[in-house]
Image (spheres, rainbow, N blue to C red):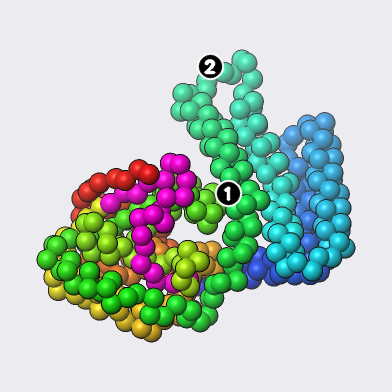
Amino acid sequence: MRVKKVYLLLIQFLIIILLMSLLFTKSIAIFAVIFALSAAILIIHILVSKNAWKVKIMFISIYTLILILQEVFIASTFFNNSSIWLAFLVKNVIGIIIIFVPFFVRYLHYIYTLEHQFSMTSKTSISFDMIREINKKRDSLKKNVSKSKTALSKENIHEIANDIPRHSYIKYLNRNSLSESYFAECEKSLNDENLYIVLSSTGSSASELISLFTQKNYNHVSLSLDKELKTTISYNGGENLTLPGLNQEQLESFNKKSDASIMVYKIKATKEQKKRIIEKINEINNAGSAYNLVGLVTKASIRPNIMFCSQFVYSILKIANLEYFEANNTKVKPTDFVENDYYRKLEFCYEIAF
């Protein structure tokens, strides 16, 4: 089992290295090879399938056309050299995205096949569960396409691309960002016998992109030592006010889209447990921290204080002996704190809709 985990971690690490290489490469060859390999794999797949030759020829033509368009795009953008770093990065991001175009076509064909594989004479044998499952897949695809338009919009990609250079996977960037007044508020909260877990759907560029992969509405989680959320804290990008890492959060920062909202839950915590949490927060604040941007994909951290939001929240709960489900902290998602509450340790407090 351990060998399997190491193997999977290695695969994830290699994938992120490949994506990072593609993001910053100035070579046309690596994209050309990946486009060609993708087309070859899909063409072989359609050839060995049980589809009629008419369908096979049609999809071979489609994959070939996509390959030609991919090669034309990458050639025209790479040979049109730009001295602007952001323009170069955006071109590479688009190059990475269009790698998946032929696979998306294959997925559409799969959905179509599911809906039309039964003849009129065998329709009576189709169960309602089958129909429900097919409709669910179709609706999910439509929803994902709609979300993709927002998450992969030009504005979002620009914002994310501008933010990437601010992060580090190997060194602490953020130190002493928490003020004395913040810790004074923490001390005041010791009489409150609860710790608060805050799930948020903010609409930030990163959150919208993450939601494409998690398929969840709430993609950020924070901790607060008080019910009024004066001591809300988590790992984040710093809102361009502080460096990425451990930062205090204000309610205004959660409101980035028309349907933004936060859900607040509480869990019983003694004064001693809350003191332990404050000590750990102070320790991280002094030692330094950084947001684990790469770890969102690799599910690993090189240094202890390089974390993402859910990784931090779970680690703090564990330090205070308040964790209520077992997990590797690098694999915890924000919604896991509610979905994995099998023993009903959490109590819902309130929701804020902006």
Q: Residue at x 53, y 76 (%)?
A: 169
Question: Around disc 2, counting alpha carbons within 10 Å, would you say few (fewer than 14), some (14 to 19), or many (20 or more)?
Answer: few
Labelled disc at residue 151? 1
Which residues are drawn in magenta?
244-264
- Eyeballing the image, is 153 above or below 141? below
Quarter of the view holding residue 312: bottom left
Q: In terms of depth relative to the viewer, which is nearer, 250 or 109? A: 250
Q: Which mark is residue 315?
A: none
Q: Amino acid at mark 1?
A: Ala
Q: Quadrant of residue 260?
A: top left
Left/right of residue 32 with respect to residue 134 in the rendered view = right
Residue at 69% across, 51% down: 100
Quadrant position of the N terminus in the picture: bottom left
Whole-percent x, y for residue 344 in the image = 21, 51
Residue identified by numbered label 2 = 124
SS for dot 2: helix
Q: Position of residue 51 (x, y in %)?
A: 74, 34
